[in-house]
Amino acid sequence: MQRLFITSGAALMGLAVALGAFGAHGLRQSLEPAMLAAWHTGVQYHVYHALGLLVLGALYRHLPQAGARATGLLMLTGIVLFSGSLYLMALTGLRWLGAITPLGGVAFIIAWLTFTWIAWKGLRTR
């Protein structure tokens, strides 16, 4: 799982940079301001949680395995649901996709609360 979280965090950071640049340069003229703002919000949270995966991966061996696994999977789920729904909504104009976004937000919140708990209760140093 450590390898999964580090490699997916790194790959997702690269994807976030590419999507951010695409939004800034490729979509600026074609999207209405609200949809462009949604795109940028998706990128912003994508970056935060890809970084979170990198931190989690770096600390993985020092944390309780079950909690660390749950935290990483929740962050991945959040990126797909939160950022992914915003990207799709911006590209398609289907505003109902915004109803999926809070599910990703809940996954993010639970991930960070779980991370807090496992760090407090189980962070081991060598």
Image (tube, helix red, strand yellow):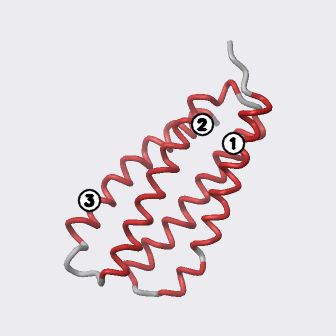
User: Residue 50 location in percent, x, y?
Assistant: 49, 47
Q: Is mark 1 on a helix, strand or loop?
A: helix
Q: Which residue is drawn at 37% across and 81% down?
A: 34
Q: Residues within 10 Å of mark 2 (few under 14, many from 20)?
A: many
Locate residue 1: give its quadrant: top right
Q: In which quarter of the image is the C terminus?
A: top right
Locate residue 123: give its quadrant: top right
Q: Residues within 10 Å of mark 3 (few under 14, many from 20)?
A: some
Residue bearing mark 2: 56
Q: Which mark lies nearer to you, 2 or 1?
A: 1
Alpha-carbon distance for marks 1 and 3? 30 Å
Sequence order check: which comes first, mark 1 or mark 3?
A: 3
Sequence order check: which comes first, mark 2 or mark 1?
A: 2
What is the three-letter code of the residue carrying label 3?
Ala
Q: Which residue is drawn at 75% across and 37% down?
A: 118
Residue bearing mark 1: 115
Q: Is mark 2 on a helix, strand or loop?
A: helix
Indicate whether 86 appears above or below 46: below
Indicate whether 53 appears above or below 103: above
Decide: marks 3, 2 in contact (CB < 8 A)?
A: no
Q: Which residue is drawn at 37% across and 73% down?
A: 37
Q: Residue at x 41, y 73 (%)?
A: 38
